[in-house]
Amino acid sequence: MNVDHEVLVEQIHRLGTRDKYGKLKVKFGVLFNDDQCANFFEAMVVTLKAAKRKKIHLVCCRLAGM
């Protein structure tokens, strides 16, 4: 896993909550509005905003170790 993935996993653990099945989840808005995440993932946010503007549907992926 590269550094960006490791940081993303750390942030999901920090900000996420577990659902009734024990899966860790975090809404994009929570990551987007968090100052610490914004500093790490500014480029990702720009890319996601551009995708949204172009009406590109994004599919969530499952990261290894989650």
Image (cartoon, rainbow, N blue to C red):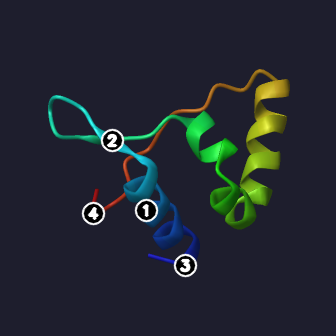
Residue matched to label 4: 65
- Mark 2 surroundings within 10 Å by alpha-carbon count, few (fewer than 14), some (14 through 19), many (20 or more): some
3 or 2: mark nearer the eye: 2
What secondary structure is marked by label 3? helix
Residue matched to label 2: 17
Taking 28 as reference, is 2 above or below it?
Answer: below
Distance from the alpha carbon under mark 3 to that under mark 2? 23 Å
Residue located at (64% from left, 25% from top): 57
Please identify the residue farthest to the top as the structure is shown.
Answer: 55
Q: Which of the two discs, 3 and 2, labels the residue nearer the N terminus?
A: 3
Taking 27 as reference, is 13 above or below it?
Answer: below
- Return the x and y of residue 1 as percentages of the image width and height: 44, 76
What secondary structure is marked by label 2? strand
- Mark 3 surroundings within 10 Å by alpha-carbon count, few (fewer than 14), some (14 through 19), many (20 or more): few
Q: Which of the two discs, 4 and 3, labels the residue nearer the N terminus?
A: 3
Q: Amino acid at mark 1?
A: Val
Distance from the alpha carbon under mark 4 to that under mark 2? 16 Å
Q: Amino acid at mark 4?
A: Gly
Tell me whether circle 3 and circle 2 mark residues in contact (CB < 8 Å): no
What secondary structure is marked by label 1? helix
Q: Which of the two discs, 1 and 4, labels the residue nearer the N terminus?
A: 1
Tell me whether circle 1 and circle 4 mark residues in contact (CB < 8 Å): yes
Quarter of the figure with the C terminus: bottom left
Q: Amino acid at mark 3?
A: Val
Residue matched to label 1: 9
Q: Which of the two discs, 3 and 1, labels the residue nearer the N terminus?
A: 3
- Return the x and y of residue 56 as percentages of the image width and height: 72, 26
- Return the x and y of residue 9 as percentages of the image width and height: 43, 62
What secondary structure is marked by label 4? loop
Residue located at (65% from left, 62% from top): 36
